[in-house]
């Protein structure tokens, strides 16, 4: 053994003695436990914070009563009404949307094998925006029959349909000889997003002052319209689609090696692409339909987790669901308390958080030679 080999062996032995041996699975499990506790604590804080302040013990007692548990903390009847009728549906909707957007972003980054990908690449957000803007501007004239028939759900249904339609168009354009080309899908998404943005601009140009106010508020996103019917409408799409994406953790891990290598490992790559795109479209389309456009959650959360938990989708996807829910709850808490009694659009808060982080990613990638 040479002196260099002996030195290297000594260093490895010393590092084993000084550093605890933590497996990837243990690190991922610990990370998920921490994220679960964070989400639970933040939920209690959000339920108790607002124009009427409610203590954490009272919040727990109110929730316990709903679960037929008696806790030794008294609360006022109007506190119960505020928590169960106003704040709880808002918290649950925020968790659904935040977790859904983050998981969709993690899945798209795995599909494109690019940490800067987000769900907007397949056109679902821009398509939903076009349909929603058209409903707001033309709802009282050209589309009056549809808005009358659908009632208060017209905007949500239109947004969901628009997102689904543009995703289908991007998917069809990305087919090359019967197979989905990821690079073509990226280019098609950019083109469709540009066209959708132009159409949205035309509707914005012809809108009146009242419609412009509605357009602006909707395009920035908000959980202000959260009700139990809204939660019930979003849960079957965003919630179930998010849970379904978690099943594709191992195939997405295989895809990190490349499409050919994933195929050799037994992964049906084409079916994986179709399934992930469909589930992302369902999840994000429903989220945009009930809360408007909320940016950067699908970009920031997965990348943060890759830096801490690693690229293993078995931990990355559930971690994204937990951290995405926490991030959106925190952003909503800031949005409804910073300028109280008014309320900021939540998209402004997420952009303030996500914009600088995105610039950090670009700077870091350039420093590492990835851009």
Image (cartoon, helix red, strand yellow):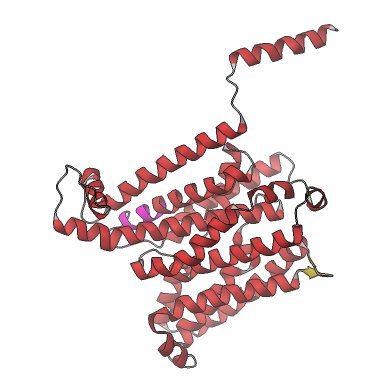
> Who's the residue at 39% across and 63% down the image?
223
Query: In the image shown, does 147 or 336 lie closer to the viewer?
Result: 147
Query: In the image shown, does 219 or 106 lie closer to the viewer?
Result: 106
Q: Position of residue 368 (x, y in %)?
A: 71, 39
Q: Where does the magenta region start and end?
A: 331-344
Q: Is residue 187 left or right of residue 247?
A: right
Image height of 102 relative to 147, above or below: above
Q: Is residue 341 left or right of residue 237?
A: left
Query: In the image shown, does 101 or 300 lie closer to the viewer?
Result: 101
Magenta segment includes 338: yes
Q: Position of residue 274 (x, y in %)?
A: 69, 64
Q: Quadrant of residue 23?
A: top right
Q: Position of residue 124 (x, y in %)?
A: 59, 69
Q: Position of residue 346 (x, y in %)?
A: 42, 60
Count of number-bearing discs: 0
> Who's the residue at 35% across and 49% down the image?
43
Q: Quadrant of the N terminus?
A: top right
Magenta segment includes 293: no
Q: Quadrant of residue 221?
A: bottom left
Residue 75 visible in the snapshot? yes
Q: Quadrant of residue 170?
A: bottom right
> Who's the residue at 63% across and 49% down the image?
249
Q: Is residue 28 left or right of residue 233?
A: right
């Amino acid at each position: 053994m040479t002196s260099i080999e002996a030195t290297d062996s000594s260093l490895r032995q010393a590092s084993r003695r000084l550093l605890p041996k933590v497996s990837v699975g243990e690190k991922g499990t610990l990370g998920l436990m921490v994220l679960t506790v964070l989400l639970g604590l933040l939920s209690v804080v959000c339920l108790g914070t607002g124009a009427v302040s409610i203590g954490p013990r009272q919040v727990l007692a109110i929730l316990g009563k709903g679960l037929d548990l008696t806790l030794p903390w008294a609360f006022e009847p109007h506190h119960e009404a505020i928590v169960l009728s106003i704040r709880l549906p808002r918290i649950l909707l925020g968790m659904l949307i935040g977790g859904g957007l983050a998981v969709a972003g993690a899945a798209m980054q795995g599909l494109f094998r690019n940490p800067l990908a987000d769900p907007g690449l397949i056109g679902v957000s821009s398509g939903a925006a076009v349909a929603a803007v058209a409903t707001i501007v033309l709802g009282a004239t050209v589309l009056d029959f549809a808005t009358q028939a659908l009632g208060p759900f017209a905007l949500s249904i239109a947004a969901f349909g628009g997102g689904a339609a543009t995703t289908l168009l991007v998917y069809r354009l990305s087919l090359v000889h019967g197979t989905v080309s990821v690079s073509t899908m990226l280019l098609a998404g950019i083109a469709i997003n540009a066209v959708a943005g132009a159409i949205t601009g035309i509707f914005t140009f012809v809108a009146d002052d009242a419609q412009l106010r509605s357009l602006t508020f909707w395009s920035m996103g908000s959980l202000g319209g959260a009700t139990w019917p809204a939660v019930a409408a979003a849960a079957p799409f965003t919630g179930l689609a998010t849970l379904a994406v978690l099943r594709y953790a191992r195939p997405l891990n295989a895809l990190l090696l490349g499409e050919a290598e994933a195929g050799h490992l037994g992964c049906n790559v084409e079916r994986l692409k179709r399934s992930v795109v469909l589930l992302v479209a369902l999840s994000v389309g429903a989220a945009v339909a009930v809360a408007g456009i909320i940016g950067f959650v699908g970009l920031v959360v997965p990348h943060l987790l890759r830096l801490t938990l690693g690229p293993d989708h078995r931990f990355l996807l559930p971690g994204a669901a937990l951290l995405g829910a926490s991030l959106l709850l925190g952003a909503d808490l800031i949005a409804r308390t910073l300028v109280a009694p008014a309320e900021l659009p939540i998209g402004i808060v997420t952009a303030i958080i996500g914009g600088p982080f995105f610039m950090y990613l670009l700077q870091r990638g350039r420093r590492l030679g990835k851009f």
